[in-house]
Amino acid sequence: MRLVFMGTPDFSVPSLRALVQGGHEVVGVFTQPDRPCGR
C-alpha cells in the first residue's frame, strides 16, 4: 500500500517503522518543523 504518514516524531517513530517493515511504500512524511531554542 502506498501511503503518506503524518505524526509527531517521538511518538510516531514506532508506527512508521512498523509500516515500513510491513512492506508498505511510504511516499511522504509530514512532521512539525523544529522550534527555535531559547524562547
Image (spheres, grey):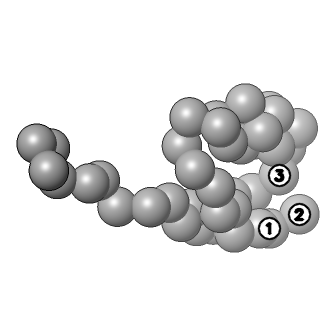
- Residue closer to the observer: 23 or 36: 36
Query: In this view of the protein, which residue sits in the foreground, 32 or 18?
Result: 32
Q: Image quarter for residue 15? A: top right
Q: Which amino acid type is shown beneath numbered disc 2? A: Met
Q: Is residue 13 above or below residue 26?
A: above
Per the model, the C-alpha gap separating discs 3 and 2 is 5 Å
Q: Residue furthest front?
A: 39
Q: Secondary structure at mark 3?
A: loop
Q: Earlier in the sequence, mark 3 or mark 2?
A: 2
When the figure is inspected, residue 15 is found, relative to residue 39, above or below; the finding is: above
Q: Are marks 3 and 1 in contact (CB under 8 Å)?
A: yes
In the picture provided, is 8 more to the left or to the right than 19? Answer: left
Q: Quadrant of residue 22?
A: top right
Residue 32: mark in rendering: none
Residue 27 or residue 35, whichever sits in front: 35
Residue 38: x and y in percent read: 10, 42
Measured in 3D between alpha carbons, the distance from the residue under mark 3 to the one under mark 1, in whole angstroms, is 6 Å
* Residue visible at 69% across and 69% down in the picture: 4
Q: Residue at x 29, y 53 (%)?
A: 34
Residue 1 got which mark?
Answer: 2
Image marks 1 and 2: residues in contact by CB distance under 8 Å: yes
Q: Residue at x 54, y 43 (%)?
A: 9
Return the x and y of residue 26 as percentages of the image width and height: 68, 58
